[in-house]
Amino acid sequence: MVVDIVTDTAQTFEGTALTGRLGAVEEFYSAEIKHGRRFGEDSGLLLYVGVDQYHGAGQDDAPLVYGVDFDDFWGTPVSGGQPFDQPINRDGESYRNRYRLKAHAQYTGGGWNLWARYTRGGEQFAFAQDNLARAPYGWLDEWAIADYPSYHSLHQPGAGYQQMTLDASYRKPLSNQWTITTTFVFSRFDYE
């Protein structure tokens, strides 16, 4: 199998493209727009923004099934091999049901390559069995849930992130064999 990935840059993409997608069962909606313009042989601008709302699949389409019978910490029986009957996150749902976002801007010209990118994403998860059950099927104990009087009061698990990156590089050919390239990069990453 050969995978050919072509990355658009300020020098390879010209024009405007708008793309929309939606999905059923694993419910999602997305839109992307990109615009590229060449100013000359070695200069151009590329702008891109993509956003999606990813609701994921509900319990009817993607049931959570644990492998063994156990009682959760509050004494509610959970049947192994059967769909979990408590409310859970939708399978693949975006973190805190927030829009996921990608934005990218790039300018190339006169030896310079300048770009900035921002991304925000993440996903909600279903509870792992060891987060709901006492030993020997899990690790849950009094200290872990003292502030949670019931399953419904637990925080739903998930992971979210956002990242901003700025990159500035300058390339100066000295001869046919020698080139000096200087690069400055700033990146900020936030995860919860």
Image: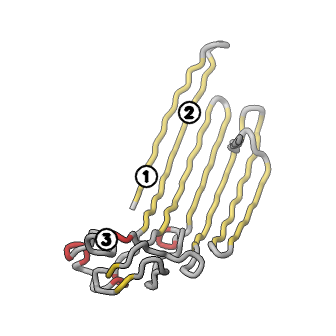
**Quarter location, residue 168:** top right
**Disc 1 packing (10 Å; few <14; some 14–19; many ≥20):** few
Q: Circle 3 is placed at which residue position?
A: 137
**Disc 3 packing (10 Å; few <14; some 14–19; many ≥20):** some
Cβ–Cβ under 8 Å for marks 1 and 2: no
- Depth check, mark 2 against mark 3: the one in front is 3
Q: Determine the residue positioned at 28% across, 80% down.
A: 73
Quarter occupied by the N terminus: top right
- The circle drawn on residue 169 is 2
**Left or right position of 51 against 81:** right
Q: Residue furthest right?
A: 15
Looking at the picture, which amino acid does disc 3 mark? Tyr
Q: CA distance from mark 1 to mark 2?
A: 21 Å
Q: CA distance from mark 2 to mark 3?
A: 54 Å
Q: Circle 1 is placed at which residue position?
A: 189
**Left or right position of 34 against 82:** right
Q: Tell me the element at label 3.
A: loop
Looking at the picture, which amino acid does disc 2 mark? Ser
- Depth check, mark 1 against mark 2: the one in front is 1
Looking at the picture, which amino acid does disc 1 mark? Phe
Which callout, 1 or 3, points at the residue further toward the start of the chain? 3
Q: CA distance from mark 1 to mark 3?
A: 35 Å
Tell me if residue 21 comes above or below residue 182 in the rendering.
below
